[in-house]
Image (tube, rainbow, N blue to C red):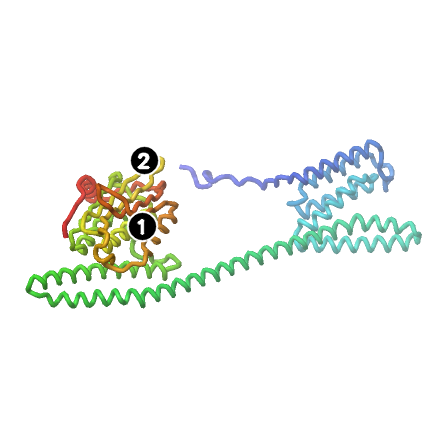
Amino acid sequence: MTSPAATAPARSPRALPRPHEEDVLIAFAGGACGLLLWFLDLGSAPVLPGLPGWLNLAALAVMCLAATLRRGWQPWVLYVGIAAQALDTLSGSLLATMVLFTDHLYAAVLYGSARFSRAVLRASVAVTALVSVGLLVAYQRAEMLLLIAACAGVLLVPTTTGEMIRNHREKAEAERLRAEQTALLAELDRKEAVNAERARMARELHDVVANHLSAIAIHSTAALSLRGSDEQGSATHEALGVIRENSVQGLAEMRRLIGLLRNAAGVDEPAAAPSLDGLDALLERARALAGDGRTFTLSDGRPPGERLPAPVELAAYRVVQEAVTNALKHAAPGPVAVALHRDPAPSGALHIRVTSPLEPDGAHGGAPRAPGAGAGLIGMRERAELLHGDLTAGPSTAGGRRVWEVHAVLPALDETAVAPPAAAGEARAQRRTEPREAQP
């Protein structure tokens, strides 16, 4: 049996960071220029005579190697650069090596930690001041000003430049963070305003609509307890039962909508949204409400056991519900047909067609059974457009009779093949082959 220590992966040593392309280019350019200067013997006199000339190349090589790690290995890169520059100065300095050293100072201030950056800047100022005072006191000649300027160019110019760029980047980052915070606060304010509006709408729906539906359900329940003995009383009792059932159903839907409006965070989800499986119950209620010779049939041509995405099922159910409601309000006696079918792949669009007979011209004085403002058609069309579908509604001719036809096409490419229970699947298969009709 192997021990846990034997199976544990071995810790790999710290890997060197991958050099940046710009750093490699700086090192290559500095090395090439240094080799050219050394080959042409264009260097300063050595401080310590007698040192071999190849030390210049060694210092140049160390400086180029350190340049490739100038971004991620501070302060060690600067320490190596100081040692290489000291060796180069003692053995006869090359201009390319000194330029690379100034770049090390710049990188130390720009990429090093904030504390190390301030230390390098203060040290460069102090060294420049000491060298200036020492040269002026020791030699007291005007030519020393050129050496002082050269020292300032090597030490102060790269460090102050790096400090300015670092400050600029820090300010830009602070402004970016401030802009992100402002955008976040604006989004929070927007969400708060939306939630407040949703709460206000929920209160209005509860106070105005839900209370009326509750009153209808309560009064119809009370009236049901006063059932008469004659035929007219029986019909009245049946009508009151239908009123109560529909008011309770409408109240449940209204409470679900109020829950959706108030529950902006998505916690404690309300009841499940209606789906196409509820069309049978919808048509049963319509048959009970019709009472004047209208029949309601459902023909479901979809594959057995198929379920569409929830937004498609909800939109399809609402379209059928609104079309059936309009048929109850305005249609003439006769068959009201609801048909569903799917296009073959790859389209797979769901077609919904609801037809209802039109009243003859002049019937009922041109007045509908119930008032309407046309908002239902607008709502159906908006539901279809939200899913990138299409909806048309208008008079047409079917079987030699004028009918009102609602035709919706809803894309359903992302369907999920979740089969319902076996009993429900058999019932749906029987429903597709034998559409039910019932005379109220």
Residue under the point 35% across and 53% down? 378
Q: Give the residue type that dot 1 points to.
A: Leu
Residue under the point 23% across and 48% down? 356
Pinpoint residue 328: horizontal percent, then vertical percent: 22, 54
Q: Is residue 380 above or below residue 205?
A: above
- Residue that protrudes farthest toward the left in the picture: 229
Q: Residue beneath label 2, please?
A: 344
Mark count: 2
Q: Circle 2: is it few (<14), some (14-19), or many (20+) Cα within 10 Å?
A: few
Image quadrant for the N terminus? top left
- Secondary structure of residue under mark 2: loop
Q: Is residue 325 above or below residue 343?
A: below
Residue under the point 82% across and 41% down? 90
Pinpoint residue 190: horizontal percent, then vertical percent: 47, 60
Using the image, tell me which numbered label, if any, was put on residue 112: none
Q: Give the residue type that dot 2 points to.
A: Pro
- Secondary structure of residue under mark 1: helix
* Camera-nearest residue between 102 and 426: 426
Q: Is residue 133 above or below residue 83?
A: below
* Camera-nearest residue between 295 and 246: 295
* Camera-nearest residue between 32 and 65: 32
- Residue that protrudes farthest toward the top in the picture: 39
Q: Circle 1: is it few (<14), some (14-19), or many (20+) Cα within 10 Å?
A: some
Side of 226 where 190 appears, left or right: right
Labels 1 & 2 near each other (Cβ < 8 A): no
Pinpoint residue 82: horizontal percent, then vertical percent: 75, 45
Q: Residue beneath label 1, please?
A: 314
Pinpoint residue 388: horizontal percent, then vertical percent: 39, 45
Mark 1 and mark 2: Cα distance apart in space: 21 Å
